[in-house]
Image: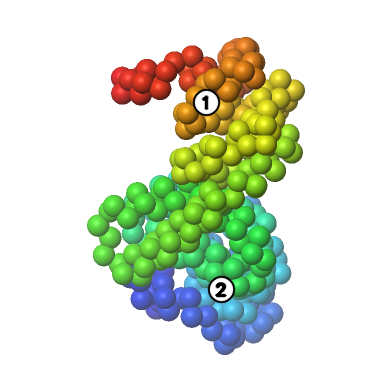
Amino acid sequence: TTTTTTSSSSSAGQAGQSTSEPLGSSHSVETFVEWLCNELRRPSNGRSEETTITCLSLLLRNQNTREVFLKHNGISALSVHLVSSHKTQTLYEVCLCAWLLSFCKPAVQEILQLNIPKKLVDVVKQANKEKVLRVAIMCLENILKDVKENYSVERYSKLVSKLIENGLRKYVATQKMNSYKDEELIESMDWLEEKLEAEVVLKISQFDEYADEVLSGTLDWTLLHKQEKFWKMNAANFVAKDCTILKALARLLETSTDERTLEVACHDIGQFISHYPHGRGFMNALKVKPLVMKLMVHPDPEVQKQALMCTQKLMLSKDSLDLLSLA
């Protein structure tokens, strides 16, 4: 009897090679899958969740079953159970289900809509068992390949950027420090790392995208804000065209009521000061200091935090800040 408990990569690989052969009468399979979907939504007893997920990790190897599962909104029911706090075996089997579904193009669309890639990033972050990490990584790889093949360049770029913002690049690098021996896992992590790095290189050279975000009046923690390379490469662009972008950032501190916009604006002004010669002088000329200091007592703690760090950069020399960071 084939089970999902094995941690070998060959077992996972065979699972991905779906079959369209019928499992039994179509009516009985559909009835059973519908019942399993309902069990995912409302487990009938304490062990029902684990048993249901184990059954699905076997049944979803069949392409026809995947289609039935989709028909009964199974992905939304399954996504609730994709949490890194699960027992190792249950988490492995949930991830295995997601991976099997990632071979089905209609399923990938739902996977994206339900933000399942973010849940998989959380699994990569927390995974301490090789088999769990492998299926999560391989599922992300499948999703990215499907989006690149079947969606627009913009949609692919947006997905990769979001994965980076969610921390995937950092978590993959951390997991690669472990002594994993599974060649398939190592290859998948290398592939993911390459695609994520390529997106970073592309984005940091696109200052226009950053400028559009600032001029829109609404900021978020998109990919560029926390990339050191972006600031090193583009700091001079902030003073181009009579400091257009710098002035726009300063205006946001005064006019915006959106907490996220205010915290990102404080962060970005601090980054400009750190990376541009005489950046502090430019900000003083724009009378930014009183605006930032006012935000130090903002009701939102994240705005307070970013305003405090920005104020330090406005008031202290680079040498003093370097000493502070070492303390």
Percent x, y of residue 97:
52, 65
Marks 1 & 2, CB-CB < 8 Å contact: no
Percent x, y of residue 313:
48, 20
In the image, is 84 to the left or to the right of 218?
Answer: left
Q: How many marks?
A: 2
In the image, is 195 to the left or to the right of 109?
Answer: left
- Return the mark for residue 224: none
Between 252 and 146, which is closer to the camera in this rendering? Answer: 252
Which quarter of the figure has residue 303? top right
Q: Which residue is mark 2?
A: 103
Which residue lies at the image location 32% right of the left edge and 55% below the top edge? 176
Which quarter of the figure has residue 88? bottom left
Name the amino acid type tagged 2: Phe
Which quadrant holds the C terminus? top left
Which residue lies at the image location 71% right of the left edge and 25% below the top edge? 251
Q: Which residue is mark 1?
A: 279
The vertical placement of 218 against 194, above or below, is: above
Q: Nearer the viewer, mark 1 or mark 2?
A: 1
Which quadrant holds the N terminus? bottom left
10 Å crowding of disc 2: few (<14), some (14-19), many (20+): many
Which residue lies at the image location 64% right of the left edge and 16% below the top edge? 287
The vertical placement of 24 against 105, above or below, is: below
Name the amino acid type tagged 1: Gly
Percent x, y of residue 202:
54, 56
Which residue lies at the image location 33% right of the left edge and 59% below the top edge? 130
- Mark 1 element type: helix
